[in-house]
Amino acid sequence: MFPEDFLWGGAVSANQCEGAYREDGKGLSIQDVLPHGALIGRTAAPTEDNLKLVGIDFYHRYKEDIRLFAELGFKVFRTSIAWSRIYPQGDEKEPNEAGLRFYDALFDECRKYGIEPLVTLSHYETPLHLSEKYGGWLNRRMIEFYERYVRTVFERYKDKVRYWLTFNEINSILVSPFISGAIPIPREQLTQRQLYQAIHHELVASALAVKIGHSINSRFQIGCMVLSMPVYPLTPNPEDVIAAMHEDEKNAAFLEIHARGEYPDYLKQYFRREGIKLEIQSGDEELLKDNTVDFISISYYMSTCAAASAGEHEQSEGNFLGGIRNPTLQSTEWGWQIDPVGLRYALNQIWKLYHKPIFVVENGLGAYDTPKERNGTLVIEDDYRIAYLREHIRQVGYAIDDGVHVMGYTVWGCIDLVSASTAEMEKRYGLIFVDRRNDGTGSLKRYRKKSFEWYRQVIASNGDKL
Ligand code: BG6
């Protein structure tokens, strides 16, 4: 079912686990002023209640953590580089050597165990200065800063890292312009023209990264990363089907441009209808066309529904993008609707349209864990997490049997970390428990959960033993 070279592993981001937010020359990132998560406004300066300032102290404990990942049998470990460790303000000419050294050591540690790093270049952690001084991705100059940064890290790690992702969940900018695009203007005040202009800048930057990466090392595999959330029609009413189609297009456009290198007709039509004229410089279109991604990566947590009469239905909570509640599905404690079959559906849809290998780089269950003390250690019996992961991995297997080329699967938050949308420690995803609570107390000690041994066996059996 799963191919021999299937890349099993786990995923985190720098800002949710590293901590050390001011160490070794690191500058502030937008996360350092978001103590309450992505959807609630920023503070003027970092405040002590921001759990990310310490995270899980991965910056100092990565060796212990990677040893645990090796014990799990990881083939791949996804993390991000904190841009503000490399270029603390973002617009400097020279990188911060201490920041570069940290990732040298981190990637070497992975390699020591034969674990392939999978690196997100920008995971919701743009240097804050770029937001404050330039307005984030609204400003075309961001392409220049991003280019300098990616060139630096591509050159530096060209022999240590092969798999790269250009922007985490690039389509989340549609709802969260600050976390996703470092844009300091609230979503409701941004015009659609501004929003799509910023998106254009990111897409050009993404294609440029593909171009630069391939010229530095032709073995690089560079992918885009899109928040995948299938949209089902709420009823069989054909008008609901059309509503779902339109809802889906908003996100699909990002895949289309990354994978085919062109703005899709439906998006061009939308621009025409709305009178949106983007500033597209000469050379942009060729750049997009000539530098499509090597593979597509997705995060997958849930599906949603759409209906022609949008306002009248119960809404569900969601991973940035929300939608109408599906009455046939159960939800997590945070109201995200659980839909393993939707993952098979999403993989099939993407494969049929783009025929590029797909990497599931995020999937997992955010849940409260109740550790029990037994014989001087903490025991966490997270059968609910095992059940969630088992069903999703099963569906990945079915998609492979359907003929989809899936490269790998990385469990999100393989070790407990601070959540992105609500900035909590107790919304736990990990196979490894970290003793830290929402009030910031805890020893930061690590404990293997029940799901740890379960996932170890999944990997050891290459997905046979679910
Ligand atoms: C994705 C992000 O949106 O979902 C991650 O890429 C995030 O950074 C994950 O942590 C889960 O969301 P949350 O809000 O539960 O942490």
Image: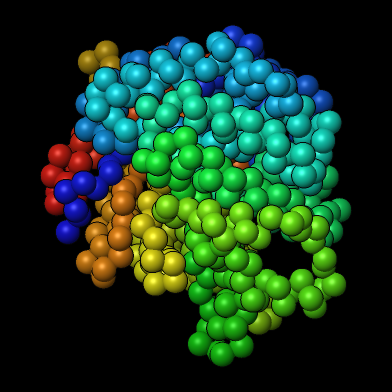
Horizontally, residue 14 falls left or right of residue 265, namely left
Q: Residue furthest bottom?
A: 238
Residue 265 seen by the camera = yes
Please report the residue visible at 37 percent of the width from the left and 26 percent of the height from the top: 160
Residue 14 appears in the rendering: no
Please provide percent x and percent y for residue 161.
39, 31
Q: Residue at x 31, y 51 (%)?
A: 407
- For this rendering, which residue is in front, 397 or 279? 279
Q: Is residue 327 left or right of residue 106?
A: right
From the viewer's perspective, is residue 43 above or below residue 100? below
Percent across and percent down for residue 410 are 35, 43
Residue 330: x percent and y percent? 43, 61
The image quarter in which residue 116 lies:
top left
Please tell me in which quadrant of the rendered image residue 45 appears: top right
Q: Residue at x 52, y 46 (%)?
A: 210
User: What residue do we see at 58% from left, 50% from top?
Assistant: 207
For this rendering, which residue is in front, 192 or 415?
192
Q: Position of residue 104 (x, y in %)?
A: 43, 18
